[in-house]
Image (tube, coloured by chain):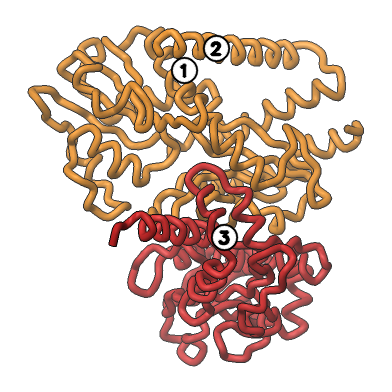
Amino acid sequence: MSNDELRELIQAGYHAIGELEFAETPDGYRLYHRRDRHSLSETTVLRSPEDARQVAKYDRSGAYRPLKGAPNLPSGWRLELPDLNALRRALDYFYPAALGTWRAFREKNARVVSLRRTLDRQTGMYRIAQKITTEQAENLVQKFCSSDGCCLRTILWGIEPDRPSVFLSRSKSDPSVDQTGEGRRIIPYLCLEGCNLLVGAARKVVLAQRKTEASPF
Amino acid sequence: MRSIEVEEMFDKRRSALILVGHGSTLNPDSSAPTFQHVDEIIRRDAFAEVHGAFWKEEPSLREVLYMVESDHVYVVPNFISEGYFTETVIPRELELSGPISHRMGKTIGYCDPVGNDPRMVDLVLQSARRVAPHVPADQASLLVVGHGTSLNEKSAEATLRQVREIRRKGWYAEVEEAYMEEAPFIADWRKNTSHHYVIVVPFFIADGLHSYQDIPVLLGIEPEPTVAASHQEVFRRNPHRLDGRELYYAMAIGSEPSMADIILDTVDRFQQKHSSETAPQTGESRDIMVAWEECQRGEAASLLRDRKLQA
């Protein structure tokens, strides 16, 4: 997404994405955690887009945060950024490709891939994940990708290529819904296909089942 | 390819660079070298835009092209060797059809991995000297450790290339290769090295679970892997005294500042190679590229012969 396109979004009233909110200031742009909305003066000031990368790396307890859509971003900081370019870079570090995938979605250029197709192209240690059944995959995704504690992305794909994703709540597949439940007008963090973490989890489901089947008890 | 398209593609300032790292869902330090080089190349203002992308982190290889504004894109694998990731995973995930692909309205140039650069051997030697500055090289065994995998024989080939090059220099009394997943195995270092001083350099891009935990356990300088993944204590306890010998364990080589130069040169080599396919080149640059490619082909063939003989 270009800077001009981001400017247009801001002018159209979009000031939130995932757990974050942003606002224009006399000196540029401010980006902060929604929980700090009413206590910004008490937050630590950061000034570089690259600081965003560091903030996004660890959760509130200090644990590594490999899934950027996880609703566990730490609060207590605010990024004061000089221009739109810096804001766009910071947003890309917090929610990688969120701006670009949403633009592609609106232009009807986003390519959505079913979980089955994602699994079918896996090789090496992940090849075994292809064995997961539709029902197992539906159960897994409902838990693993839930906006309530797991991932704030809006899922656009289904399990099988020719079947709709009815196993998910309607809100989880609706780009206009704020996945934090706050009802803000948000830039959605779209999920166009299952991530590597989900593929890894599918692999574990298959391995666990094989272990159970192999057990004499 | 039309010549105007070639010209545009070869203008780096109008192109995007995607530096591809492995990344990790467990180790917070895995992506650090890739982002370090991304930041440095952004600072140099060499490309219109620079992005990191990962197999196991975000942005993923599946999504990164949505971040790119430019019509022309160079993809450089920040990998130590050709192999499973550069030949299978990255092309598959980015849907590349060859060195030059067209996708999502963009022309994508797929470059060699950084590990193919001839200066990697200098980084290995620098790393060995830094970890054991006072050890006399002529009384030391240098063990270059690679991943190795049954999924692709080229993984080990890159490590062996460094070993052969360092042997040729004749500085170290002994230079050997060792791997995690294929023979000669790291765990057999005692019988595969013969000198009092043993310097172990992991031929890896990033320090992570392999260099923090797996290799130290295989070497016997750590018990079972129980420490947190990002602990770097293992590098601070040199030398390790084992069986009457002194072992020095170095960090991975991918964080060296000169890696940014290597990445930019990798793109230059790609440009030179593929411009010669479409437009006649004259003089020195063509000769250098021809010599370079012949050298690479010859080296690869000879390495494969060696490995087959050893097997």
Residue underneath mark 2: B299
Res. B128 visible in picture: yes
Taking the view exactly as shown, the residue that stands out farthest to the front is A216
Q: Look at the numbered discs 3 and 2 and tell me whether their residues touch, using CB distance below 8 Å.
A: no
| Location of residue A101 in the rendering, given as x and y in whole percent from the top left corner | 71, 65
What residue do we see at 34% from left, 46% from top? B209
- Secondary element under disc 1, as helix, strand or loop, is helix
Judge by depth and name the residue closer to the eye, B10 or B311. Answer: B311
Res. A28 visible in picture: no
Q: Colour of chain A?
A: red
Q: Nearer the viewer, mark 3 or mark 2?
A: 3
Q: Earlier in the sequence, mark 1 or mark 2?
A: 1
Position above or below: B115 against A41: above
Circle on res. A195: 3
What residue do we see at 58% from left, 35% from top? B86
Residue underneath mark 1: B161
The C terminus of chain A lies in quadrant: bottom left
Q: Look at the numbered discs 1 and 2 and tell me whether their residues touch, using CB distance below 8 Å.
A: yes
Query: Mark 2 is on which residue type?
Result: Glu
Position above or below: A217 against A16: above
The chain containing the residue under callout 2 comes to B
| Location of residue B42 in the rendering, given as x and y in whole percent from the top left corner | 61, 48
Is A115 displayed left or right of B168 in the figure? right
| Location of residue B2 in the rendering, given as x and y in whole percent from the top left corner | 91, 33
